[in-house]
Amino acid sequence: MQNKIKLAKIISKIENEHPDTEKILNDVWHNVGSAYRIGITGPPGVGKSTLVDKIALQLSEQNLKIAIVSVDPSSPFGGGALLGDRIRMNELSLNPNIFIRSLATRGSLGGLSVKTQDICDVIDSFGYDIILIETVGVGQIELDIVEASDITTVVLVPESGDDIQSMKSGLMEIGNIFVINKSDRDGANSLETNINSMLQLKKQYKNSNDYDIPVIQTVATKNKNIDLLLEHILRYKTKLKQNNDWFLARKNRIENKINELITTHLLENFWSDERKSIIQEHLKKSNYFDNTPYQIFHKLLNVK
Ligand SMILES: Nc1nc2c(ncn2[C@@H]2O[C@H](COP(=O)(O)OP(=O)(O)OP(=O)(O)O)[C@@H](O)[C@H]2O)c(=O)[nH]1
Ligand SMILES: [Mg+2]
């Protein structure tokens, strides 16, 4: 419990960009790297939280330490948890093997993956074996989560069949495992057929011999097929380790993080008062057509 409180405090510091963040991350770094990071995404209300809870409970029975991070893109509140989620969080956090935390994005989607990554690094360093990252699949945010995770699980429901065509380039692209939750409702089988034929097409198009992407029907509320889903999730980890992809994912994250730090640093240094006033001058209506963006760009670069 003591450790959980300590972890929660550190996460708040990172979330709020506290000046200690850099030191915290430097201090924990040598203990980072072994947690399996599982992204769970999908449209609103498909049962992601219910699934995550069941997965966490099953794994905790195997005496694994599980952290749940829910990234809430819409919540304007600090901490980001809705009332229902808070109750749920209280229940789960009584389990000594489960740590649960919700993160609000506060309207700024940019940099979410990096922040989530920093937070996952700290959780990892606290000895958690598995980190479940839940987020609603809405464009950029789901891509951020793909970057922060080792595996992406896309959750759909039988009704998703209607808009599956439009999902071709979104959720369909990022799943390493597909879950059709609420399969107690009509349409689960035909959605499964649809997803499988789409995945087949994708495979032919890419001419890849990749691992077959599983499509699993679950009923989260009744614990149905959670064990099967877990089996696939854990099998994927073995595959990642065999292919060296486990290491590659970590290497990519470090590279992205460094790039992000450089970009932030350069931008902050670039926008001196003088440069800001030059650009404002050029953007005045009366000067609008005098210079092209390229010309202004070079002018700004040449300011000492
Ligand atoms: N019938 C049925 N209902 C389910 C199932 N899984 C979850 N639900 C219900 O669906 C509702 C939404 O579940 P959540 O787990 O909160 O869904 P979510 O995807 O996390 O929702 P957001 O985080 O708001 O996007 C709840 O009322 C659940 O009890 C299922 O397999 N079958
Ligand atoms: Mg949820």
Image: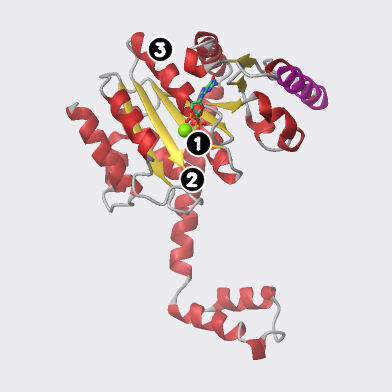
Is 31 in front, or is 214?
A: 214
Q: Which mark is residue 58?
A: 3
Q: Position of residue 86 (x, y in %)?
A: 33, 35
Callout 2 touching callout 1 (CB < 8 Å): yes
Query: Which residue is at the far bottom?
Result: 286
Determine crowd level at label 3: few under 14, some 14-19, many 20+ residues with C-alpha closer than 10 A: some
Q: Which mark is residue 19?
A: none
Find out whether residue 30 is within the magenta segment: no
Does the rendering let one see residue 31? no
Q: CA distance from mark 3 to mark 1?
A: 20 Å
Q: Which residue is mark 2?
A: 73
Earlier-in-chain disc, 2 versus 1 = 2
Height in image: 211 above or below 83? Answer: above
Q: Determine which quarter of the picture holds residue 84.
A: top left
Amino acid type shown at disc 3: Gln
Q: Determine which quarter of the picture holds residue 6.
A: top left
> What residue sits 71% from the left and 78% below the top?
292
Highlighted magenta segment, given as a residue range: 190-205
Secondary-structure class at tag 1:
strand
Q: Position of residue 10 (x, y in %)?
A: 26, 40
Secondary-structure class at tag 3:
helix
Earlier-in-chain disc, 2 versus 3 = 3
Determine crowd level at label 2: few under 14, some 14-19, many 20+ residues with C-alpha closer than 10 A: many
Q: Position of residue 202 (x, y in %)?
A: 78, 26
Amino acid type shown at disc 2: Pro
Q: Position of residue 127 (x, y in %)?
A: 30, 23
Q: Which mark is residue 135?
A: 1
Q: Where, quadrant-wise, is the N terminus in this rendering? A: top left
Q: Looking at mark 2, is its residue's CB closer than 8 Å to ligand 1?
A: no
Height in image: 120 above or below 106? Answer: above
Is 39 in front, or is 52?
A: 52
Q: Looking at mark 3, is its residue's CB closer than 8 Å to ligand 1?
A: no
